[in-house]
Image (cartoon, rainbow, N blue to C red):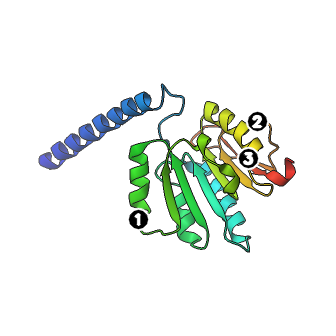
Amino acid sequence: MDIFLLLFGCVLVVACIGFELYFLYALFISKNCKYPPAFPSFGNMKKIALNEAEKILQNSNTPLKVVDLGSGTGGLLIPLARKFPQHQFIGYDWDFFVCQILKFRARHLSNLKVIRGDFLKADLSQYDLLLCFLDTQAAEDLSLKVQQEIKENARIISSAFELKGLNPTQIYDAKSYGMPLKVYVYDNRNNL
């Protein structure tokens, strides 16, 4: 029993050190926090975002191109790509490590592609559904970009942050773990 506790303690210490080193790396590589390190979708916010994406994907008669901007390790993309093999999924993230994790997790999914890069430099006009869980600065930057680029019939599901200049068709209360979170759903046909 003592050996088990000692091993568990060692593993916990190594994991904590690894986690701290990752955040130092992320702080350095993210241009002093212009874009934050990966933070997974969670709680009610994740459930609502998945549910809304599933409704859109189920009701489509044609294959859709779905992009997750700041996809992290694929908390939204992996379950959607598994459930809807007829649609194409793209995960964008700036972080090398989380892209590698997502690539490994998606290795058996031929309908999911991972792109390491700045999604603000990507051409968003090709996507039918955009998913995002961003911080305030990235949401502001993305707000301007989507107003100029996205398809006439594109949909956006934004977790936690409202996209300025667009009118949401739905706003869901996604309070999770005591945090007052929301999920915003946009239909670009309402913003023309």
- Name the spot of residue 70 as percent of width and height, x first: 55, 45
Residue 162 shows in this picture: no
Say which amino acid is labelled 3: Glu
Which numbered circle lies on residue 10? none
Quick one: label 1 or label 2, which is nearer the N terminus? 1
Which numbered circle lies on residue 164? 2
- Name the spot of residue 7 as percent of width and height, x first: 17, 46
Residue 148 shows in this picture: yes
Q: Residues within 10 Å of mark 2 (few under 14, many from 20)?
A: some
Q: Residues within 10 Å of mark 1 (few under 14, many from 20)?
A: few
Residue ID for mark 3: 149
Cβ–Cβ below 8 Å for labels 1 and 3? no
Give the foreground label among 1 and 3. Answer: 3
Q: Is residue 192 left or right of residue 69?
A: right
Query: Which residue is depicted at the point 16% across and 43% down?
Result: 6
Quick one: label 3 or label 2, which is nearer the N terminus? 3
Residue ID for mark 1: 107
Q: Is residue 154 left or right of residue 49?
A: right
- Residue lying furthest top in this view? 32
Give the foreground label among 3 and 2. Answer: 3
Query: Which residue is depicted at the point 67% across and 39% down?
Result: 142
